[in-house]
Image (cartoon, rainbow, N blue to C red):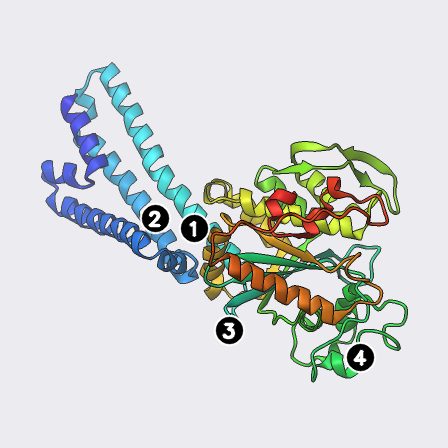
């Protein structure tokens, strides 16, 4: 019995040592060498992580590395299971008493299932990550940071049966400091009128005076740019997504910031992503209806701090009954902030399968796979910093007749303040609380999230 237990433990602690002790030296030496290679690999990863987190992120977002790692984990799992079973065979179980044999059989099964199961589970996570990267992320060339900032256009919308084409109802330009990770969110209302386009672009030639007049007729708002360009794709030869390109160019002209990449979120599946992470914690400041605008109000989301499931979160972010588009924009910012703060590495790791499945259904982006490590690193930096938000909404901006020079000044001011905050220890600017908004919106329903230097405080 002592010999059987010893052989089992030897295989767990030092695979191959039991075979060497039993005279199967060739097999044992092969196993020991393989174990040594694996141990050195893990040690190398640990040391690299201490020295350069970016290098680890590069490796673990490379599909070739992930593919090799997956097969290595499967191979180690099978080999370890074989060595444990072989150690049990070497122990000569038939020489044991019945109760001892039963105990050792159970131990053998537990060791096989636990050790190999852990390795196979790790290989499954690696496979899911590889599949997620290949499905969601592009393979184009990387875009360099402009003036030390990455600007990513986040679009949220759907192409429901009652809509003509896909219309991004949520448009946020996320501007991130390349060095510090400090982030500014610039929200553009879907009903922003007369948006300009950069000189020389297809849209500028079609609409030299901005997106207005003949061509768009009565539908000349920012969220209609996407549909117009997709309907005239012949004007964009060789462009895969004319609507997204035109929308990105409009955002560039409006804000004065170049757009490096876009991320499109299909809001019809957004609730699956929220459910995949177990819901998100939000402070609901004012009662939000579920339903309305074309249908009955079926329920409401009550005020207070609570965990919302995917269905509730989707309505919290999209509802504009009893409020306005601008209040909805503020709530969407609070959802983004909650996701940023709550999607910590532990949550992502333990629920990665469900997150990846949901993400593959609702996300598309121009960020190439080669740049994932850059944005993972930036997101880790951003989690511990206040997020600044600016929205081009009333009372500062008249969305029907916008002052684009004022908008670009607001953008430049917000970026300058964010960068200055990254080089000093001065406290953030106080949260602004509008008092007269012309509708039921108020600070209580998080309207202040539209214009603040600390989004978490406003939400």
In this rendering, would 391 be left or right of 344?
right
What SS does tag 2 mark? Answer: helix
> Could you classify mark 1 by the number of other residues whose Cα lies within 10 Å: few (under 14), some (14-19), or many (20 or more)?
many
In the rendered image of this protein, does residue 393 appear above or below residue 299? below
Q: Which residue is mark 4?
A: 207
Foreground tag (3 vs 4): 4
The first of marks 3 and 4 along the sequence is 3
Most foreground residue, 253 or 415:
415
Q: Disc 3 to disc 4, how far (Cα)?
A: 29 Å
Foreground tag (4 vs 1): 4
Q: Disc 1 to disc 2, how far (Cα)?
A: 9 Å
Tell me if label 4 and label 2 are in contact, CB under 8 Å.
no
Q: Position of residue 209 (x, y in %)?
A: 81, 79
The C terminus - image quarter: top right
Q: Which residue is mark 3?
A: 141
Tell me if label 4 and label 1 are in contact, CB under 8 Å.
no
Disc number placed over residue 126 in the picture, else none: 1
Foreground tag (1 vs 2): 1
> Could you classify mark 4 by the number of other residues whose Cα lies within 10 Å: few (under 14), some (14-19), or many (20 or more)?
some
Q: Disc 1 to disc 3, how far (Cα)?
A: 24 Å
The first of marks 1 and 3 along the sequence is 1
Residue 377 visible within the image = yes
Q: Disc 4 to disc 1, how far (Cα)?
A: 48 Å
The first of marks 4 and 2 along the sequence is 2
Q: Which residue is mark 2?
A: 73
């Amino acid at each position: 019995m002592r010999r059987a237990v010893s052989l089992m433990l030897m295989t767990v602690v030092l695979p191959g040592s039991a075979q060497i002790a039993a005279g199967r030296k060739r097999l044992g030496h092969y196993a020991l060498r393989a174990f040594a290679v694996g141990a050195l690999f893990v040690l190398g990863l640990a040391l690299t992580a201490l020295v350069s987190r970016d290098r680890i992120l590069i490796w673990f977002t490379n599909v070739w590395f992930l593919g090799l790692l997956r097969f290595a984990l499967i191979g180690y799992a099978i080999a370890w299971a074989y060595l444990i079973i072989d150690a049990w065979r070497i122990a000569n179980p038939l020489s044991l008493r019945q109760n001892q044999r039963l105990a050792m059989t159970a131990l053998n099964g537990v060791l096989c299932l636990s050790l190999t199961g852990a390795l196979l589970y790790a290989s499954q996570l690696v496979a899911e990550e590889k599949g997620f990267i290949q499905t969601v992320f592009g393979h184009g060339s990387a875009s360099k940071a402009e003036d030390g900032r990455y600007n990513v256009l986040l679009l949220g919308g759907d192409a429901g049966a009652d809509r003509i084409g896909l219309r991004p109802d949520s448009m946020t330009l996320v501007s991130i400091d390349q060095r510090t990770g400090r982030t500014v969110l610039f929200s553009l209302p879907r009903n922003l009128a007369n948006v300009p386009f950069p000189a020389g672009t297809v849209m500028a030639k079609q609409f030299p005076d901005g997106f207005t007049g003949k061509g768009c007729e009565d539908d000349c708002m920012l969220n209609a740019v996407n549909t117009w360009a997709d309907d005239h794709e012949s004007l964009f030869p060789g462009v895969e997504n004319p609507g997204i390109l035109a929308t990105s160019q409009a955002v560039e002209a409006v804000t004065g910031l170049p757009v490096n990449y876009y991320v499109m979120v299909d809001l019809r599946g957004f609730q699956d992503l929220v459910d995949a992470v177990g819901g998100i914690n939000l402070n609901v400041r004012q009662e939000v209806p579920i339903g309305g605008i074309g249908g009955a109000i079926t329920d409401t989301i009550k005020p207070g701090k609570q965990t919302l499931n995917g269905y509730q979160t989707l309505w919290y972010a999209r509802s504009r009954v009893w409020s306005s588009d601008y209040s909805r924009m503020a709530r969407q910012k609070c959802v983004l902030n909650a996701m940023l703060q709550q999607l910590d590495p532990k949550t992502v790791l333990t629920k990665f399968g469900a997150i990846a499945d949901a993400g593959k259904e609702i996300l598309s982006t121009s960020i190439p796979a080669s740049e994932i490590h850059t944005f993972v690193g930036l997101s880790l930096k951003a989690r511990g910093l206040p997020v600044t938000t600016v929205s081009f909404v009333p009372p500062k901006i008249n969305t029907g007749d916008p002052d684009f020079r004022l908008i670009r000044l607001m953008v430049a001011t917000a970026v300058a303040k964010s960068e200055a905050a990254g080089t000093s220890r001065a406290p953030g600017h106080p949260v602004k609380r509008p008092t007269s908004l012309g509708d039921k919106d108020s600070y209580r329903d998080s309207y202040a999230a539209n214009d603040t230097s600390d989004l978490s405080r406003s939400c």
